[in-house]
């Protein structure tokens, strides 16, 4: 019996992968650490020094360090990203802040799963269920939004590359709908190429 | 070659003949035809029966305004499309269409006999006639009316096609790709902003496709079109969407566009969706939706062969089809002349143009004379004849001096002027104004960022359209030659003498709903004076064409009858969709497994393999029970309950809502939010809590565990998770913003494995680290943090079964492994998975309520016998004030009690009424109802809960449950049936 917790992880997207003939791709990302940090914007400086990155002050902003990054998803709310094995260290670091800076830091590493939508037509594909103007969104921005009936966190990581962060039980729905629409698009591309 | 096809001209591909079938007969058409143009080319005018009177009908238009030529298209199993406009149906090889509203055939239709009874089917007929005898309504009248009503037949098979949808954003959306729309798109897209141009037709160009002789800036119309479209195609910032109808204009410049992807194809490409719904958010909208020609209202104006003058021109110039060999025209506008001239030049015989006007432009008269066409000015039509196709028209001078003249013909063109298509503008909540000159309403006040251009704005001269659409950007004026402006003419409600010519049959206003002019007169006489009332009483404008050809004529006739200026009448509301839109498009992806989300817990796959039967709980599906071999549901539940109480039961409780509440004011916040006192809950302890709405009624319950002075782990019901979280946020943001406390949903971070039964501690002890499991050091209603199988756990000692119970919270990604290991280790204890059903049975044995089952949103804690959950010394909590209102304190409020049937084998029916007496009164007063009822296997008898008026004061009384078979006598008892002292729980 292996007792290391990291060997026991299961994701609702285990085994999923999709690439279309035109290069549109859905790929599951390895699970990293995610923590929700909430505190008054005036205390952001303290949190930045603890986390080691200048946390973004505007909603939608992303700050990146070597291994860690952070997305501001709302007033007083940030998602902190880091390698999974750093969760306890981050929690420990913020604990030192508790007396001087009231805040809330909650580990949600396993609440969600992540995957990448990339390739030509990625924005159109996500727009099948997401009402945002993705073309006008700058690379390096992120937001909490919806895809069809599910809430997602969306990060634009490249011109044709988006990272989706979805709650576990909603993830198969989001993935399968994206895959279904991607296949419809593939059929359209095939048809227009032969006609 | 088709009989009525011209030798040259048109935009059809004469080298690509297509075979198609209509009403079982085979015909030939060409690529580029519509079904309507192909039928006309084969001399087929009579294609439909009308909706109410089953009158023979032909093709009256060439566009989406078609009110008569509606057909059913069949393309294999499940693909039956009713009410397809033949004028908008792109012809493809093998197309198979049939007429509607006729039986046994189009030619010989039984329903036509109702035509003979026409006079009795006047407006309001149904409202008046089927009132008596009352008993006939359900069995006779309604089924007959339903059978004969409705347009076309609804499909009976599931739709085999798929549909897709997409949100889109642009700076400028242009709806309509006629000359105005194309110029608008050219100008708008010059600077690189995102432009979408859509048009409902297969081909861009609008009316220019029907007027090849027009010369624009020195180019033939069609060359100008080709060049302009090529420019648009070359711009990467422009999206061109042909076959795409802008059908709805909603708030904040959100428009719905329906794109038809495969309907025009002979072979349906595998895997390709049939239609796409574009949900477009545009910064600015340009409506270039054009105008629709108005029919004239005169007796017998609906015969096959009678059509709009512009349509005949379109059939000739665009499709190379002559609509007849001997064609007449009746008009009040100049536009009809151009159609008549074009037909005459193409070799049709055009004996006469009947014009109601006394004074006609000399240039037109000269041209008519040159083409040997007689112009009958100040004349009118009093009658037409020809059953399945118009044969002749009876013409009279308006003065009525000369005798009626009969002129034979096989087609009759009519033109009553043009009506701007203001549907989308009106949907945008823009205000219209009446334009006397064109006799129609035009856009006036804009509410959203939108403009109307071209004919949609009442601008009927091509020169003006091209030069005015974006005047500041046009450096040079575009020269236009050979244009025939649409606007010049006289606007009339119906042809003169038409009212007197009643005996010659109906003068149709609404062709699709079979409303005639005199129906509107009748409505007015019966007291309906508002156009909205007249519309509903006569149903004019209420068909699927939304009155595209009938609204203006209808309002004019009503104005005449009321002797009121038409400008004062107002127009009825235009509603989306502009044209009928498939349910498939509106539903988009939301069908089958995408209709709704099914949330699955981390052990769902395991449960599925283990044979679980599932049940929905909110969006979640949970294992209901785990039947073995031949077990029935109740046998399985009984076994699961017994095994749990005897040794160990294991259950997945991951779906419970969980919220982490953190901050220096966390305790204060929870103290205000829940009824219970929370300030002094020690770290490491749990408390069962009730949440009330402001009305004092219970809406959720749960358990709160204190992890530290400033950190709480709150659980909610499965179904209540989202609403409790939202309510907490609401109060934090609006009522108590001063509190330093933050909420995080952790429902899916932590999976929960519930273990219940006397052997649970023995099972987990070897695997738990850093937690002292000793019953005194880790008592009931406590929480400890440590590890299980080296995985971090928040271990709750709580129980919803009455047994020794633990809820093992582990990170969701680890849950399946932990579950499997517990199953493996539990073998020696006969560990038994149980589902939601067994849980419900066991909690009932213990007297625990389920919020939403035993309570229904109208119970206070006192009503549920849970006064103990209220912190009476607290200054306030949500709902507190409501609890002391007089009605809340009445002694006879329904109260939660246990019920035991005198016959212990009787399981009472949930929802059954409870009465206080068995006999004496025919209708004894209801004093309550049953909320939960089960056969308890461990106890060996049935148990039930109910709400009984003043029930808490009636413990020990007998009450009665009248059921269809017999009345059951039951005793009101304390709701705790099992281990009332709680020995097992605290063991």
Image (cartoon, coloured by chain):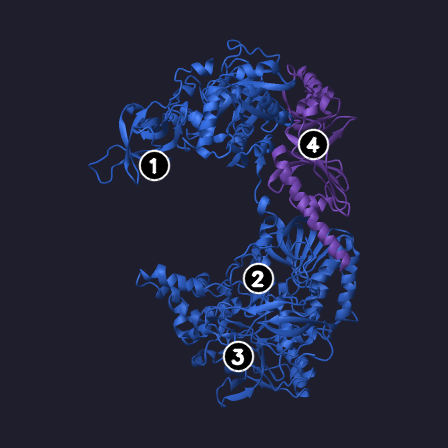
Query: What hue represents chain B?
Result: blue
* Residue B709 shows up from this direction: no
Q: Position of residue B863 (x, y in %)?
A: 36, 27
Q: CA distance from mark 2 to mark 1?
A: 47 Å
Q: Nearer the viewer, mark 1 or mark 4?
A: 1
Chain letter for mark 4: A
Visible residue check, residue B244:
yes
Residue count near mark 2 (Cα–Cα under 10 Å), binned few <14, some 14–19, many ≥20: some
Is residue B973 shown left or right of residue B49?
Answer: left
Q: Are marks 3 and 4 on the same chain?
A: no
Label annotation for residue B81: 2
Mark 2 or mark 1, which has the lower sequence index?
Answer: 2
Q: Is residue A19 above or below residue B657?
A: below
The residue indicated by pointer 1 is B912
Q: What label sits on residue A58 in the rendered view? A: 4
Label 2 close to label 1 by CB (< 8 Å): no
Tell me the number on the disc at residue A81.
none
Q: Is residue A5 above or below residue B165?
A: above
- Disc 1 secondary structure class: loop
Determine which residue is flagged by label 3: B388
Task: Give the Cα separation between the discs numbered 1 and 4.
Answer: 57 Å
Q: Chain of mark 3?
A: B
Pointer 3 and pointer 1 on the same chain: yes
Residue B429 position in % (x across, y down):
56, 54
């Amino acid at each position: 019996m292996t007792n290391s917790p990291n060997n026991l992880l299961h994701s609702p997207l285990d085994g999923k992968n999709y690439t279309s003939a035109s290069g549109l791709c859905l790929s599951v990302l390895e699970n990293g650490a995610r923590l929700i940090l909430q505190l008054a914007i005036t205390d952001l400086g303290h949190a930045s020094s603890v986390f080691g990155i200048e946390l973004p002050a505007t909603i939608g902003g992303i700050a990146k360090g070597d291994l860690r990054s952070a997305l501001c998803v709302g007033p007083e709310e940030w998602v902190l990203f880091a390698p999974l094995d750093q969760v306890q260290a981050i929690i420990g670091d913020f604990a030192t802040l508790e007396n001087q800076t009231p805040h809330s830091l909650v580990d949600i590493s396993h609440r969600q799963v992540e995957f990448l939508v990339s390739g030509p037509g990625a924005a159109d594909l996500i727009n099948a269920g997401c009402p945002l103007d993705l073309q006008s969104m700058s690379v390096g921005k992120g937001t909490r939004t919806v895809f069809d009936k599910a809430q997602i966190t969306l990060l634009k990581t490249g011109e044709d590359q988006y990272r989706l962060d979805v709650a576990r039980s909603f993830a198969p729905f989001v993935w399968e709908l994206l895959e279904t629409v991607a296949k419809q698009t593939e059929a359209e591309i095939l048809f227009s190429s032969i006609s | 070659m088709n009989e009525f096809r011209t030798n040259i001209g048109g935009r059809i591909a004469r080298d690509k003949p297509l075979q198609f079938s209509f009403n079982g007969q085979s015909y030939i058409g060409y690529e580029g035809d519509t079904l309507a143009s192909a039928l006309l080319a084969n001399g087929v005018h009579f294609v439909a029966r009308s909706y109410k009177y089953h009158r023979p009908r032909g093709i009256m238009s060439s566009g989406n305004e078609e009110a008569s030529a509606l057909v059913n298209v069949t393309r294999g199993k499940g693909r039956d499309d009713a009410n397809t406009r033949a004028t908008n149906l792109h012809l493809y090889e093998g197309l198979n269409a049939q007429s509607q509203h006729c039986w046994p055939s189009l030619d010989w239709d039984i329903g036509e006999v109702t035509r003979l009874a026409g006079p009795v089917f006047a407006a309001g007929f149904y409202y008046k006639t089927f009132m008596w005898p009352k008993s006939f309504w359900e069995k006779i009248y309604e089924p007959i009316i339903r059978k004969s009503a409705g347009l076309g037949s609804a499909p009976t098979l599931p739709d085999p096609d798929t549909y897709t949808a997409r949100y889109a954003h642009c700076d400028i959306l242009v709806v309509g790709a006629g000359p105005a729309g194309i110029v608008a798109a050219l100008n708008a897209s010059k600077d690189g902003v995102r432009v979408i141009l859509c048009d409902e037709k297969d081909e861009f160009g609008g009316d220019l496709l029907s007027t090849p002789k027009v010369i624009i800036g020195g180019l033939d119309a069609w060359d100008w079109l080709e060049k302009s479209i090529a420019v648009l195609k070359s711009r990467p910032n422009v999206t061109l969407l042909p076959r795409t109808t802008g059908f709805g204009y909603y708030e904040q410049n959100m428009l719905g566009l329906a794109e038809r992807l495969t309907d025009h194809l002979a072979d349906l490409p595998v895997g390709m969706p049939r239609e796409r719904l574009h949900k477009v958010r545009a910064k600015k909208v340009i409506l270039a939706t054009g105008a629709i020609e108005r029919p004239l209202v005169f007796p017998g104006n609906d015969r096959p062969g009678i059509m709009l003058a512009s349509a005949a021109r379109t059939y000739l110039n665009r499709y190379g089809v002559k609509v007849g060999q001997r064609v007449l025209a009746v008009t009040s506008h100049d536009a009809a002349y151009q159609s008549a001239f074009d037909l005459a030049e193409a070799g049709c015989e055009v004996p006469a143009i009947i014009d109601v006007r006394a004074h006609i432009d000399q240039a037109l008269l000269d041209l008519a004379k040159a083409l040997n066409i007689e112009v009958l000015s100040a004349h009118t039509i009093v009658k037409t004849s020809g059953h399945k196709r118009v044969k002749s028209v009876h013409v009279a001078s308006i003065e009525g001096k000369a005798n009626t003249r009969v002129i034979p013909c096989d087609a009759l063109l009519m033109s009553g002027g043009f009506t701007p298509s203001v549907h989308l503008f009106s949907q945008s909540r823009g205000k219209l104004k009446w334009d006397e000159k064109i006799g129609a309403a035009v856009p006036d006040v804009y509410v959203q960022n939108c403009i109307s251009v071209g004919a949609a704005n009442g601008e009927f001269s091509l020169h003006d359209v091209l030069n005015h659409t974006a005047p500041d950007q046009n450096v040079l004026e575009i020269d236009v030659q050979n244009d025939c402006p649409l606007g010049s003419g006289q606007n009339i409600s119906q042809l003169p003498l038409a009212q007197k010519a009643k005996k010659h049959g109906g003068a149709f206003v609404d062709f699709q709903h079979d409303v005639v002019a005199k129906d509107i007169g009748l409505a007015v006489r019966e007291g309906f004076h508002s156009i909205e009332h007249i519309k509903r009483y006569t149903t004019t404008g209420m068909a699927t064409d939304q009155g595209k050809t009938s609204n203006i004529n209808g309002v004019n006739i009503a104005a005449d009858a009321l002797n009121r200026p038409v400008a004062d009448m107002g127009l009825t509301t235009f509603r989306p969709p502009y044209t009928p839109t498939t349910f498939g498009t509106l539903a988009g992806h939301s069908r089958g497994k995408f209709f709704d989300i099914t949330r699955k817990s981390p052990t769902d796959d395991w449960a599925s393999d283990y044979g679980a039967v599932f049940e929905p709980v909110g969006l979640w599906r949970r294992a209901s029970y785990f039947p073995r071999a031949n077990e029935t549901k109740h046998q399985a539940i009984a076994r699961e309950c017994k095994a749990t109480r005897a040794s160990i039961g294991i259950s997945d409780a991951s779906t419970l809502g969980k919220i982490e509440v953190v901050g220096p004011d966390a305790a204060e916040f929870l103290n205000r939010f829940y009824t219970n006192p929370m300030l002094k809950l020690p770290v490491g302890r749990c408390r069962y809590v009730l949440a009330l709405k402001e009305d004092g009624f219970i809406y959720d319950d749960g358990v709160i565990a204190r992890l530290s002075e400033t950190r709480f782990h709150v659980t909610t019901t499965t179904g209540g998770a989202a609403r409790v979280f939202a309510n907490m946020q609401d109060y934090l943001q609006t009522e108590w913003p001063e509190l330093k406390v933050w909420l995080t949903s952790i429902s899916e971070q932590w999976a929960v494995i519930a273990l219940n039964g006397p052997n649970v501690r023995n099972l987990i002890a070897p695997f738990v680290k850093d937690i002292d499991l000793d019953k005194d050091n880790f008592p009931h209603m406590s929480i400890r943090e440590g590890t299980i199988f080296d995985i971090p756990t928040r271990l709750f000692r709580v129980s919803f079964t009455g047994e020794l119970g633990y809820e093992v919270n582990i990170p969701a990604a680890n849950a399946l492994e932990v579950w499997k290991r517990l199953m493996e280790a539990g073998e020696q204890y006969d560990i038994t998975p149980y589902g939601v059903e067994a849980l419900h049975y066991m909690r009932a044995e213990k007297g625990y309520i389920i919020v939403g089952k035993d309570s229904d949103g109208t119970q206070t804690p006192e009503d549920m016998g849970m006064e103990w959950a209220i912190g009476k010394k607290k200054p306030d909590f949500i709902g507190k004030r409501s609890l002391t209102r007089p009605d809340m304190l009445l002694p006879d409020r329904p109260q939660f009690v246990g019920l035991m049937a005198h016959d212990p084998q009787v399981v009472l029916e949930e929802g059954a009424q409870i009465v206080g007496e068995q006999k004496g009164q025919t209708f004894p007063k209801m004093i309550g109802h049953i909320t939960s009822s089960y056969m308890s296997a461990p106890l060996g008898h049935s148990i039930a809960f109910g709400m009984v008026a003043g029930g808490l004061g009636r413990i020990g009384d007998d009450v009665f449950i009248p059921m269809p078979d017999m009345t059951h006598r039951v005793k009101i008892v304390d709701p705790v049936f099992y281990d009332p002292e709680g020995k097992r729980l605290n063991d």
